[in-house]
Image: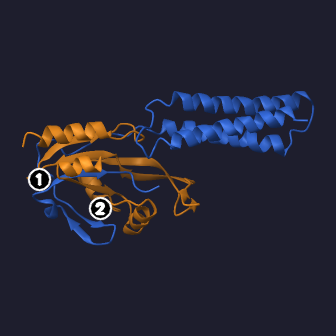
Amino acid sequence: MRNDLEKHDVRVIALSKDTVQDAAFHRQRDGIGLPLLCDPDLEVIRQYGLEHHKALEVSTGRFTIAGIPLALVPSIKTMAIPTSVLIDEQGVIRWIDQTDDYRLRSSNERVMAAVKSAFDSC
Amino acid sequence: MLDAPIVLASAGALAVLGSWVAYLATIPSGNVPAKPVGSVIAQLIGVGLAAAAIALRVQGGQPIGAAVVVPASFATMMATFFVFLLTQRKTPIGAIRIKVGDPLPPFAAQTADGAPFHTDSLNGRRILLKFFRGHW
């Protein structure tokens, strides 16, 4: 997936309500290579209209067993609705994909189809 | 000799745990089933086995005992939690304020390194911006 995106010169950036400390921990624990942006006050998430009020979060905190995070602590929080936004060199939005079931995300096929349709004719 | 209620309750706990593990294993690859029918059936079977174990004990007029109560409770609680999580899956889409063809609304944020970030730095680049729920 990453290679396919690189072929089309598309960089991935991810934003969530995590604090800098949470994001740094997450990045290290899960070996995430892509840049993570932090929006703990939900300013960007609100600006874009992507708020999920009173969403159920099941978090590990910092708890792991043998390196495997075990979800333990349910809580109710406001967070982003999982959403993918494809932007071109001019800063124009070319594709938006939003899920109505947070368990399901944009599949690789859907993302690559959008990337190809946006950039292959260029 | 194997005690039937203990075997049943343990099998129930294993069915529920196995179903949880199999479901969670689909997450990293992005292959989460849209309708996890198999998982729900496995969880129900687990609860059914747990209930059968307790019923056998009650029928036999014996104390239920920790060896049955612990796995039966585990199966019931974990299955209930699984179904509860499923009921919470819907997201309130519809309030979105961006649309295809519009310029990306500029914003500032901090990176995971604590460095300042502004969308100006994306100028001239193709970007896939992912909004996600946050760490686990």
> Residue B73 occupies which quadrant of the picture?
top right
> Residue B119 occupies which quadrant of the picture?
bottom left
Give how far across and how far down residue A35 sits, in percent. 29, 61
Give me the chain that's blue: B
Give me the chain that's orange: A
- In the depicted structure, whether residue A79 falls above or below residue B20: below
Q: Secondary structure at mark 2?
A: loop
Is residue A98 shown left or right of residue A24?
left
Is residue A46 shown left or right of residue B103?
right
Give how far across and how far down residue B93 sits, in percent. 31, 39
The answer for how far apart the CA atoms under marks 1 and 2 are is 18 Å
Residue linked to disc 2: A35
Q: Residues within 10 Å of mark 2 (few under 14, many from 20)?
A: some
> Is residue B57 at all visible to an observer of this figure?
yes
Residue linked to disc 1: A91
Quick one: quadrant of the C terminus of chain A? top left
- In the depicted structure, whether residue B135 falls above or below residue B70: below
Q: Residues within 10 Å of mark 1 (few under 14, many from 20)?
A: many
**Residue type pointed to by label 1:** Gly
In this rendered view, identify the residue nearer to me: B13 or A83. Answer: B13
**Residue type pointed to by label 2:** Pro
| Chain to which mark 1 belongs | A
Give how far across and how far down residue B56 sits, in percent. 85, 29
> Is residue B94 at all visible to an observer of this figure?
no
